[in-house]
Amino acid sequence: MHEERRDRGSVAAGVVSGALRYARSRGADADTLATAAATTEQLLADPDARVPLASHLRLLRAAAAELRDPAFALHLGADVGMAEVSVLGLVMEASATMGEALVPLQRYGALALQAYPAAAGGPPFEAEHDGDRLLLVDRRPGGTEPELVEEAVARLVCGPRRFLAAPHVLAVDVPHPRPGHGAEYERVLGCPVRFDTGRTALTAAPAGGELAGRAAPALRVRCAAGAGEALLSTLSSSPAAGPARCREQVEDVLRAVVHQGDPGADAVAARLRCSRSTLFRRLREEGTSYRQVLDDLRRELATSYLQAGRVSVAEVAYLVGFFEAAAFTRTFRRWTGTTPGAYRALARRG
């Protein structure tokens, strides 16, 4: 049953590509590893591709054997950040605090790795508060092989370090017994590790820690999808054009938060230091509405991401605030008369 669950899980092609690149940089033969994982360059180049979880696990084990590094998955997670292999990491790094970064982790986790079954429709991780500490527990019933745990935990622990003034993870629990390279866990993770606990969990410092030095959210996320030039030209437009219209001010606010879900008008009005009724009145005077501005912005971002071709359709859906790819596809068809996949294929041919 456990093997069946693993086979029915999947990882994003970018995660596998990142592992291959890292193994190659350390001297492994990429073709040999790709063969072990039963993947092809064509598959890994497709942003919509999903690779069986079992294939990724075979890759991690083959790399560990070839490099004679039993802690390969741990080193991979520490050295290759999530932002390098998945939009999940980019959105997390665009967050202002550790607490805010947990939101995309909850929403986008399956984009990077989806273990079977998908947490019964709920989030893959659960956050529990214990005084001034935060306990982040992986509730997924699959994906508990030691290599997968090592890779995931190392990314969550080591990735944010460059943005934080102090350590944010105080202890780590892992479900499997202590391996022969157990000492390497604490060296890499920089905190106590408890083995054979039956779960994967991180005990973190207060969730409100500032992610200092992070990139500006709107710029970071847009540039990640290859659509930064339009934003840069907007940012560098001449101030001589006069004060920004209300619509433009609303768009500026929405660009920074639309990837978090459906932004409410009250929150946007608060950022603009006006009431909801004042916001609606100003937009109405300009011949538009809040819902129309949000809809238009989502369409603009979605088409830019799809034309760039660097993220999958599912990732585009989440980036523009949809919790489900199916809902995004229905809305995109309303916008353009075609599906996201067909739109991107047409853009590539053009």
Image (cartoon, rainbow, N blue to C red):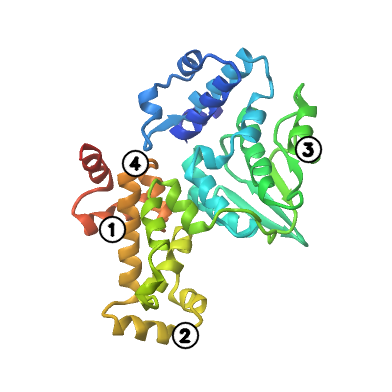
Left or right of residue 319, residue 21 in this image: right
Q: Amino acid at mark 1?
A: Thr
Q: For this rendering, which residue is in front, 216 or 297?
A: 216
Find the distance from the CA under tag 1 to the CA under tag 3. 46 Å
Asked whether the beta carbons under mark 2 and mark 4 sit within 8 Å of each other, the answer is no
Q: Nearer the viewer, mark 2 or mark 3?
A: 2
Q: Name the residue: 43% across, 62% down.
A: 255
Q: Secondary structure at mark 3?
A: strand
Secondary structure beneath dot 4 equals loop
Cα distance in 3D space between marks 4 and 1? 19 Å
Task: Please say if the residues under marks 2 and 3 sit with CB atoms less than 8 Å apart.
Answer: no
| Residue 81: image location, x then y, percent | 59, 39
How crowded is the residue under tag 4: few (<14 C-alpha within 10 Å), some, or many (20+)?
many
What is the spatial separation of the Cα atoms under label 2 and label 3, in whole angstroms? 49 Å
Q: Rounded to the nearest whole Å, what is the CA distance between mark 2 and mark 4? A: 39 Å
Residue 275 is tagged as 2
Asked if 243 appears above or below 207 in the picture, the reply is below
Q: Is residue 34 above or below residue 261?
A: above
Q: Looking at the image, can residue 245 be seen?
A: yes
Tell me the element at label 2: loop
Q: Residue at x 56, y 51 (%)?
A: 92
Residue closest to the far left: 337
Residue picked out by circle 3: 193
Position of 199 compared to 262: left or right?
right
Residue 10 visible somewhere in the drawing: no
Residue 254, how many percent across, how many down? 43, 66
Quick check: 140 above or below 219? above
Q: Earlier in the sequence, mark 1 or mark 2?
A: 2
What residue does disc 4 label? 309
